[in-house]
Image (cartoon, grey):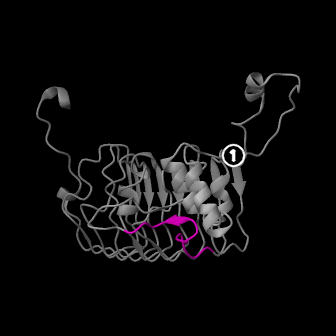
Amino acid sequence: AFENLKYSYNASGRLNKVTYLYDMMDNDNIDFSLVFGHQEFNKSENKQNLSKQVPWGVGLSYLDLSFNKLNEIPYSLSLLGNLQTVNLSHNRISGLYRDWICWRPPVQNGTGKNRHCYWFRASAQTLKVLDLSYNRIELIGEIQPWYNVQLAELHLQGNQITTINPEAFAKSRLKGSLVVLNLDYNKLMYFLLSSLERLEEISIQHNQLGNVENDSLPRSSQLHRVKLANNCITAIETGAFNNLKMLDFIDLSHNQLLHIYYDSMTMTKRTTLGSR
């Protein structure tokens, strides 16, 4: 690890590529984060007790940067190691991909490291709520903007999103952690989010959706609220809502449906009395 750091420093005179440093941290035995907070300690204590008194685990947990003029996510957020909620709503963020924070190694013959972004690296284990609503984001590509983060809530409403690559969720930890997803007031014409295994509530209202396919909705056993109002939906594919046993609320108002068939919302036949 130290040899890698030394090589990077000698090559440029400084560690000016944070993705290189983070990649080393992923693959070697080094780590760091920036901690907000302090605690007085007795200087006479020996070093073994000192490590117990310095508040390494204490840090900033809630950060609200809403209603500012940010053009991108501040990469300094990647250093904050205890964040639980980040509010970046009502800014001017136009993209989630920047060369100095996103790791894009060349892919040769279908092999190579995963491509991802380190926006929230230090708080990957603690960050639960991310609000990027009312910005200028246009797409979510296959590269993970939330690498290794286990979000419970993701708010993306009020952007200009036209495309969501399902790989951004299917190959991330959000697949098994996300509970609430809001994509209202965007420009989506379709969505494929069946990989989200724990989602409880999804809202994609005021978009340009044309239909609901079998792979559109999360196949989550906990899904209970689906909001698809104010779209252009003309058809629901057979089986689109099937076997969602916790589903108790569907809003399809203000669409263009001519028919809705019973086999779009059925349950698999029970094979035994005990399975009722």
Q: Position of residue 180 (x, y in %)?
A: 48, 52
9 sits to left or right of 53: left
Q: Which residues are magenta?
A: 93-106
Q: Which quadrant holds residue 53? A: top right
Q: Nearer the viewer, residue 44 or 259?
A: 44
Q: Position of residue 237 (x, y in %)?
A: 21, 65
Look at 53% across and 67% down and name the residue there: 157
Is 65 covered by the magenta stretch? Answer: no
Secondary structure state at the residue bearing disc 1:
loop
Mark 1 Cα-neighbour bin, 10 Å: few <14, some 14–19, many ≥20: some
Q: Position of residue 172 (x, y in %)?
A: 41, 54
Q: Nearer the viewer, residue 188 or 5?
A: 5
Q: Which quadrant holds residue 241? A: bottom left
Look at 75% across and 34% down and name the residue there: 55
Look at 79% across and 42% down and name the residue there: 37
Q: Nearer the viewer, residue 226 or 133?
A: 133
39 sits to left or right of 185: right
Please state which amino acid type lies under the numbered disc 1: Ser
**Residue beneath disc 1:** 61
Direction left: furthest residue: 271
